[in-house]
Image (spheres, rainbow, N blue to C red):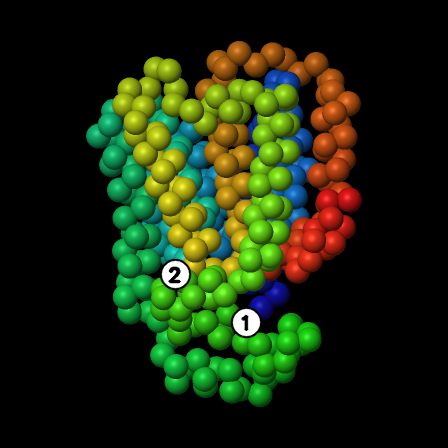
Amino acid sequence: MFAAVWSTALIPSAALALLVLLLVRRGTTQTIALAALIACSPWTFDPLFRYRTPDQFGLAFLIASGLVLWRTSGRARTAWLAVLGLLGAVLTLVHEATMAVWGIFALLLIVQTPASVASRLRAVILVYSPGLFAMASVMAFGRSDGDLVSLLRGQPTTAVFLDQQFVGTPGYGGVLAHMGDSIADSLALVHSISPLRAILMLSWGLMLLLIHYSWLKGASPSFLRALRPLDELPRAWIVWASWAISGAAVLFVFATGVDWIRWFCSAGTSILVIGALLLLRHPNSGDRTWTGDFSPALVAIGVYFATRPVLPPMGTDSIKGLLDWWL
């Protein structure tokens, strides 16, 4: 049990640490600035260890996809992408958000790969068709019936465990309470969130997005350029369409669940990873060699980021609680 739980934090953290080391090894001002941001950000390492949920394996999947597209070609790339596709199907069965929040962003890496449209389309099919089949199967046939949910929640050891995990809310079933939910049930659950809580969680995510953007604009503008279609890449509309598909998948998760803080962290980390992998794949981006200098403003932001604890999955219940986090 301990190995299963902690692997959800250790495996994606190791993959993310490898990416940070690759950025530092590139040795430009902008890649090192991005490495520092990933290391300090409240979106990245802290949530992986705090939440320890199985969907976090999707981060390792995303980074592995980027390394395959960067380091392989020809038949070897095709074989590795097929393996990743099968792995994605398994991870979808482990947790549906693995691909919907993390893995979907590999689509941006595939379409930004210099290749023919047919080659990129084939890569998309190899990577995503097994996972889509698995997710469709679960949505159509995998929902637990009420009797099974009641049986699981009625076990004495289960009840004791849940009461220990959710102190102050005896009888709360955690994920077990929602195993029999339909899409309509999930939408209703999100609709039941108080407006204040929803606003506070959105404020937390949007303010962090703004601060991350200010860092990237000042320290690593190549990151922002990497997220746009390459000048020499034909059919740029494919890239924008991929952003739309990835965004729609993330919005679907937000619309059917209440862990918005956790998914802000997941999506934010995924975007940082995408930009990092694109920078590593295209070294001729005009970056200068590392000078060893950060502006005082960036140092201050980095220290601030590194000292912020991660909020609980449901966010904070009060404006004071959010201000306590910010201050």
Residue 236 x, y percent position in the rendering: 32, 24
Q: Residue at x 46, y 46 (%)?
A: 102
Q: Nearer the viewer, residue 221 or 67?
A: 221
- Residue occupying image coordinates x 28% and y 69%: 141
Disc 1 packing (10 Å; few <14; some 14–19; many ≥20): few
Q: Residue 198 lies in what quarter of the image?
A: bottom right
Question: Relative to residue 148, is residue 129 drawn left or right?
Answer: left
- Residue 25, position in %: x, y? 61, 24
Residue at (49, 74) in percent of width and height? 176
Q: Is 323 above or below relative to 18? A: below
Mark 1 → mark 2, Cα distance in angstroms: 19 Å
Q: Position of residue 127 (x, y in %)?
A: 32, 43
- Residue 28, numbered circle: none
Residue at the disc numbered 2: 93
User: Does residue 88 appear to the left or right of 49 in the view shown?
Assistant: left
How many numbered discs? 2
> Which SS class for mark 2?
helix
Look at the image and tell me in which quarter the C terminus lies: top right
From the viewer's side, name the closer residue of 87 and 302: 302
Q: Is residue 114 above or below residue 317?
A: above
Q: Say which residue appears at 47% left-offset and 66% top-offset.
A: 189
Q: Which residue is mark 1?
A: 174
Under mark 2, the amino acid is: Leu
Task: Look at label 1 and name its amino acid.
Answer: Gly
| Residue 42, image x, y percentages | 65, 43
Q: Could you tell me which quadrant the N terminus lies in?
A: bottom right
Mark 1 secondary-structure assignment? helix
* Residue 303 appears in the picture as rendered: yes
**Quarter occupied by residue 81:** top left
